[in-house]
Amino acid sequence: MERFDTIVIGGGPAGLMAAGRAAELGERVLLVEKNDSLGEKLLLAGKRRCNLTNAEPDMEKFLSRYGKNGRFLHGAFSRFGPTETLAFFNQNGVPTKTERGNRIFPALPPEKSAQGAQRVLDCLLVYCKKGNVRILRRSEVKALKVKNKRIERIVTNIEELSADRCIVATGGKSYPKTGSTGDGYRFAAQAGHTIVEPTPAIVPVKTHETWVKLARNFNLRNVRLTATVNGQKIDERFGEMEFTNFGVSGPIVMDLSSFVSDWMKQGTVGLVLDLKPAMDLPTLLARIDRDFEKYRDREFGRALVDLLPSALIPLALELSDVPGDKPVSYVSPEERQDLARLLKNIPLTVNGLWSFDHAIVTKGGVCLKEVDPVTLRSKLCENLWFAGEILDLNGPTGGFNLQMCWSTGYAAGQGARVESVVN
Ligand SMILES: Cc1cc2nc3c(=O)[nH]c(=O)nc-3n(C[C@H](O)[C@H](O)[C@H](O)COP(=O)(O)OP(=O)(O)OC[C@H]3O[C@@H](n4cnc5c(N)ncnc54)[C@H](O)[C@@H]3O)c2cc1C
C-alpha cells in the first residue's frame, strides 16, 4: 500500500479540518472513514443550516462557554479561532451571516437555507482535495497497535495500515446512527489515555412527574427555569422550553442538560418553572383577582383563559388543589395565593437524561491533562494527536461545538506536520 505520513481516523468536521490542514502544509494524508459518506453528523447540524460558529467578540467569554475545560482551548483558538474560521469559510465559497444569539450560519436565500451544512461540508472536501488527501470510505478502524509509546499499526476491517503519525477524530457517542459510536475512546485507551466518563449533553431531561405529558409539545416562551441541587439554586435560564411525554426539552432545558449528570452526583436535582417571570407574586395575584372578577360567573378552569394558554390549563388544574368546576366566586383568597405561587414555582424532579441517541453532543472523553493544548498531541503516545468531540470538551448550542472542532482539527493537522518537519 502507498505510504502516508499521517492517517486521520474519522471524516467529521474535526477530521476533515485536520486532514486538510496537514495536507496543505505538505503531509501525505490518508483519511479513514467507516461510513459510505463523510460528515454525516455535520449534515444534520443546525437543522441542516449549520450553525458553524458564534460571533461572541470577547474571547474569554467565548471560552467560558465550554465550562472550566474551556481554558484548554486558548492555544488552539489563538492559532485558529472564530475569526480565522470565518475567514476560512468566507474565502472558500461559504459567505456567512449572523443571527439571533450571535449564531453564524452560511448566508443563503431562505429557500436554500437547508443546504448550509452541505456547503460547509463541500468546502472542507475541496480543502482536502486541494491537498491531495486520500479518502478511504467504508473502512472501519478496529484497533490501534501500540508499541513503545508509538502507534505501529492501525487495524481496519479490511487491512492493517501504518503511517508516521495518527490523528484520532472519531467524535463522541451522541447520535450513533451517524457513525459516532465512541470507538475512539477505545483507541485512546489502547494508547494509555484516561477517558472521562462520556455522558449525553444538550439532550432532553427526564422527570419523575408524569403530568408533564398533559401539555407535551406545547412551546413555552419567556419562562424561567431554575435548577436546584438538594433544594439549593445552582443555575437558571430564561427563554423557551417544552414538556415532553417523559419530562422537559427545548433550548433552555438542553442548555442546562450538559450539567445535569454532574449535579446528579451531588444530590437530588430539581427544576423550578416560573411561567410568569415578568410579574412578581403581588402583581400576579392582582392580575388573578382582576381576571376572576371579569369571569366571576364562570367556574375556576374557564376563568384561567386570559392568564394561561389553553394547552396549559389542564396542567394548572392537575397541579392546583382547586377543582376545575368550582365557581370562581367561591375560590378563596388563600386558593388564589396558592395559584399565584404555583404558576411561579412549578416543581419538577429530574430522574435522568435521554440517551445518546437523542444527545447533540457528548460530555466527557479523552482527558485533557494528557493532551498538549497547543498541538493536540498526546503526552503519552508520541505519534498520536486528537481532534474534535472525542476530547473532554463540549459547549452549549450556538456554534460552540463546531468551533471547537475547527480549532482542534486545525491545530492537530498543523501539530502533526510541524512534528514531521522537526524530526
Ligand atoms: C442533530 C445535531 C445537530 C447539531 N447542530 C450543531 C450546530 O448547528 N452547531 C454546532 O456547533 N454543533 C452542532 N452539533 C454538534 C456537532 O455536529 C458535533 O460536535 C461535531 O459533528 C463533532 O465533530 P467530530 O468531527 O469531532 O465528530 P463526528 O462529527 O462525530 O465525526 C466522527 C467521524 O468519525 C467516524 N468514525 C467513528 N468511528 C470510526 C472508526 N472506528 N473508523 C473509522 N471512522 C470512524 C464517524 O463515522 C464520523 O464520520 C449538532 C449535532 C447533532 C447531532
Image (cartoon, rainbow, N blue to C red):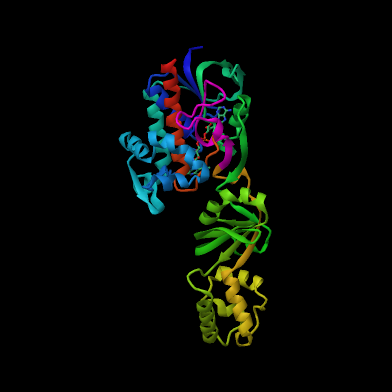
Residue at coordinates 65% horizontally, 83% vertically from top-left?
326
At horizontal 58% and vertical 50% (from top left) the residue drawn is 259
- Relative depth, front residue between 113 and 1: 1
Q: Is residue 292 above or below residue 124?
A: below
Which quarter of the rendering shows the C terminus?
top left
Asked whether residue 309 is drawn in magenta, I would say: no
Q: Is residue 80 visible?
A: no
**Residue at 54% over, 84% down:** 295
Q: At x 53% / y 86%, what residue is drawn?
A: 293
Q: In this rendering, does residue 123 appear at all? A: yes
Q: In the image, is residue 377 part of the stretch drawn in magenta?
A: yes
Q: How many marks?
A: 0
Q: Percent x, y for residue 103? A: 40, 49
| Among the 4 quarters of the image, the one containing residue 410 | top left
Q: Would you place residue 333 above or below residue 79 in this image?
A: below
Q: Is residue 63 left or right of residue 346?
A: left
Image-based side of 77 in relation to 215, left or right:
left
Q: As displayed, is residue 17 above or below residue 327?
A: above
Residue furthest left in the image: 91
Q: Is residue 271 above or below residue 64?
A: below
Is 159 placed left or right of 423 in the picture? right
Q: Bounds of the magenta span?
A: 362-389
Where in the figure is residue 117, as x and y percent of width and height? 43, 40
Q: Nearer the viewer, residue 22 or 392?
A: 392
- Give the percent coordinates (x, y) of residue 249: 57, 55
Quick one: 21 or 243, which is closer to the camera?
21
Q: In the rendering, at what x and y percent does residue 111 appear?
A: 37, 48
